[in-house]
Image (cartoon, grey):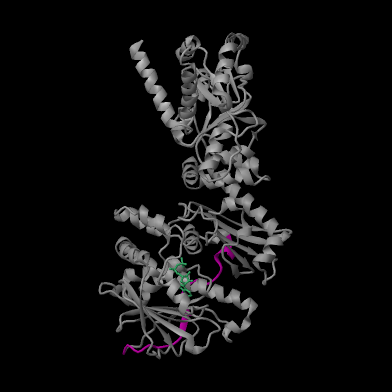
Amino acid sequence: MTENIAANRETMGFQTEVKQLLQLMIHSLYSNREIFLRELVSNASDACDKLRFEALHNATLFENDTDLHIRVSYDKEARTLTISDNGIGMNRDEVINNLGTIAKSGTREFFSRLSGDQQKDANLIGQFGVGFYSSFIVADKVVVTTRRAGEQADQGVRWESDGGGEFSIEMLENAARGTSITLHLRADQDDLLSGHKIRSIIHKYSDHIVQPILMKKEEWKEDGQAITDEDETVNQASALWARPKNEISDDEYKAFYKHVGHDYEEPLAWIHARVEGHQEYTQLLYIPAHAPFDMYDRNTRHGVKLYVRRVFIMDDAEQLLPTYLRFVRGIVDSSDLPLNVSREILQESKDIEAIRAGCTKKVLGLLEDMAANDKDKYARFWDEFGQVLKEGAAEDFANKEKIAALLRFASTHADNNEATVSLPDYIARMKDGQDKVYYITAETFNAAKNSPHLEVFRKKGIEVLLLSDRVDEWVVSSLTEFAGKQLVSVAKGGLDLGKLEDQAEKQEQEKQASDHKDLTEKIKASLAERVKEVRVTHRLTDSPACLVADEHDMGGNLARMLKAAGQKAPATQPILEINANHPVVMRLKEEEKHFDDWAAVLFDQALLAEGGQLDDPAGFVKRINHLMLEMRAG
Ligand code: ADP
């Protein structure tokens, strides 16, 4: 590529985040410096894929050169290493955006999580993705020349930077299609100026790249002249997924993952299968070890790539897997879809529906297998992706039972904040006579664990699932049954423990209800609109009162979540349940003068105990102070 530099050089500053990333990376990733080559080759490969795809609709982009490849060369005297491709290239705006900013969502969160500890930060940077900027681990000057496919020869762009705060950019008058990246190596990087060394790095990290990676053949005459000027292909240059499984090593699978997943770490697990029959396709799907920074962003890039007969069609083909499996990375290669398939066509395609169902089944099968045979690994999976998988229990009707069995919850069984209990575990240890799965939802684990609603369950040794993830309310609203057992909130409706209570207990409850009829009516009259009903409870052993939602009303936790999210929650009144055996309630029976204050405090403390917010906090404080003074006086 001749550089005919026009006098149009402009200097620009990197986005602040890029500056931070550059500084960090050079130090934290130094011990792993070889990865720069993997990143640059991976980008070059993506660029070739993109060109092949765009050319499906516009063949002139090939400019009569359809032989896509990547070239790696070095120059001992100039101390440079060059990686070039004849892929899609970039125009001026693209260069400025792609090589001057970080467009990823989650960038701010990423920087806020850095600790200053090199080892930890190196891992984080890896998860974040280092990409092009990793060049500066080994280079103190990087020059990029590029021209976008289809543009005139004088639309080339030259970018240069020393990795400090700035880069320069200028137009080139004569540039070949594609991108060429020249690294001016740092003083201590001379060992990279060796054909042997470069080949070995390519074998290690980039063997699976589909395009040929070309290097000059290295045969020398005795006088040091090169014998030949020929190129040779130094990688396998075949689609990894198309090879038979038994010929692919774990290391090859892992290396391929790092390329498709844009991940620096090894994957947690993968599944590689060829499906034959009505639809023929190959799937190579990976579960990452860590959640990406942008997992909760539904527009994440780099999901599953779609290929048709080895030709790359698109990144992040969201139709290939349901949203709740958006953490999966990998490829699907179809033998049947047309090459000119577009996102619009995919949305309507019955063939894609079949592929999607097949991929979903395979991933769930992989998880089931992991949960059954490698509990530690599954626990790691759950920590990272459990929240997202939970969406599936609410979303994927066809696989609901399967997904439900994969869910893990905290419960009163272990009473710690570790989600280790599955629904089958729970059911296996249900008490004699128990026919329901009990749960409580609350804003935090502690609020769930310490909720007064659990008192009778604790007394009777009945396990209750403790749900405190935001998505849990959504899960239980559609997962109302598992294996024929109803899932029931302990904070909703009248508590019917069925056979878990004996005849004597039931009679005692009825007696208490009629004995306290006057009291509950009086409290109801005092609290008026604030409650739907006041009744004697058998849920409580230690607390004087609690609130419950009526059977078909929205629960308090969900209503609070909706409000916090700025949404409207239907105005429902809770039911106040009082513990007739509690001294405070007994005392209330005698109260004349301050009855209204006592009733209000009883209601407010029940609301506070379940994590609710008081309507009139100052009024509450005033009443409490009043009662405290009265106690001293009495
Ligand atoms: P990532 O690859 O994760 O997007 P990078 O920092 O490696 O992040 O690259 C940023 C962007 O620069 C890429 O998304 C791509 O658009 C562009 N880019 C990088 N290398 C090339 C290349 N060889 N050819 C064309 N575009 C490239």
State the image coordinates of residue 607 (x, y, percent, origin top left): 49, 28
Q: Quadrant of residue 313?
A: bottom right
State the image coordinates of residue 35 (x, y, percent, origin top left): 39, 66
Name of the residue lying farthest toward the left: 187
User: Considering depth in this image, is 605 or 434 the residue closer to the camera?
Assistant: 605
Left or right: 218 as drawn, with respect to 372: left
Q: Is residue 222 visible?
A: yes
| Quadrant including the N terminus | bottom left
Is residue 234 within the magenta segment?
yes
| Quadrant including the C terminus | top left
Residue lying at 63% horizontally and 80% vertically, measured from the top left: 58
Q: Main secondary structure of the magenta part?
A: loop
State the image coordinates of residue 245 (x, y, percent, origin top left): 57, 59
Q: Is residue 285 above or below residue 569?
A: below
Residue lying at 35% horizontally and 57% vertically, measured from the top left: 122
Q: Quadrant of residue 281?
A: bottom right
Q: Is residue 175 above or below residue 435?
A: below
Q: Is residue 279 visible?
A: no
Is residue 77 within the magenta segment?
no
Q: Is residue 169 above or below residue 396?
A: below
Name of the residue lying farthest toward the front: 593
User: Considering depth in this image, is 73 or 390 the residue closer to the camera?
Assistant: 390
Q: Quadrant of residue 22?
A: bottom left
Left or right: 507 as drawn, with respect to 624: right
Image: magenta residue range: 223-244
